[in-house]
Amino acid sequence: MATDDVDLIVEQWRRERAGMRPEPMAVFGRIYRLARLVGDRQEKVYAGWGIGRGEFDVLAALRRSGPPYTLAPKALAASLMLTSGGMTGRLDRLERAGLVRRAPDPADRRALRVSLTDEGRRVVEESAEAGLEVQRRILDALPPADRDRLADLLRDLLAAAEAEPPDRAG
């Protein structure tokens, strides 16, 4: 079996701190490195459409919402775990680029709704396919059954992390 930099790090900790038990680094170190590598590659792909990962996430949330591809800014911010200020900055950039439009909510004129423009829909659909291709090329290193098993294991691990009370850190 091949070794990688994470194996080296785990082994160094074992050598330097015999009682430490650094095995979780073998999993989370790889998850972190994989997320960074793939995220950086997707970021380069999205740049071809003049957007970054943050803007892609907003466009994708609108597109996934289904017709008429419209959400309230608060709903968008909540789904992307952003502050209202962070969401405003992204929406400003996307609106200047002609990819979204903000308009008063017909049900509550004090509120806003954010909608994909036709150009925004085109950009998110094309860039989503290109981003998925980056992921597919990497996943092709695993047989289909292993991909399914990995997805199941990561789902279980994510559920365990989400169930962990935040005050247990440290």
Image (cartoon, grey):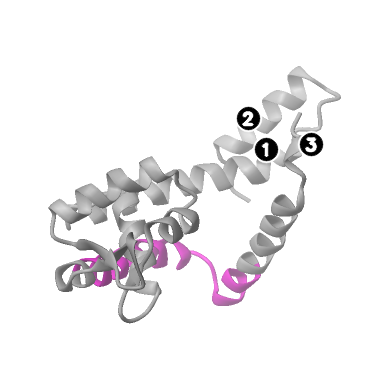
Name of the residue lying farthest toward the right: 19
Q: Is residue 141 magenta?
A: yes
Q: Secondary structure at mark 1?
A: helix
Q: Looking at the image, is 102 positioned above or below residue 52?
A: below
Q: Which residue is mark 3?
A: 168
Q: Residue at x 63, y 43 (%)?
A: 28
Secondary structure mainly formed by the magenta segment: helix
Q: Which residue is mark 1?
A: 25
Q: Amino acid at mark 2?
A: Ile
Q: Amino acid at mark 1?
A: Met
Disc 2 to disc 3, C-alpha distance: 25 Å
Residue 56 image offset from top left, x and y in percent: 31, 57
Q: Is residue 151 above or below residue 38?
A: below
Q: Nearer the viewer, mark 2 or mark 1?
A: 1
Question: Of the residues under marks 2 and 1, which one precedes in the sequence?
Answer: 2
Residue 47 sits inside the magenta stretch: no
Q: In the rendered image, which residue does mark 2 sit on?
A: 9
Dot 2: element = helix
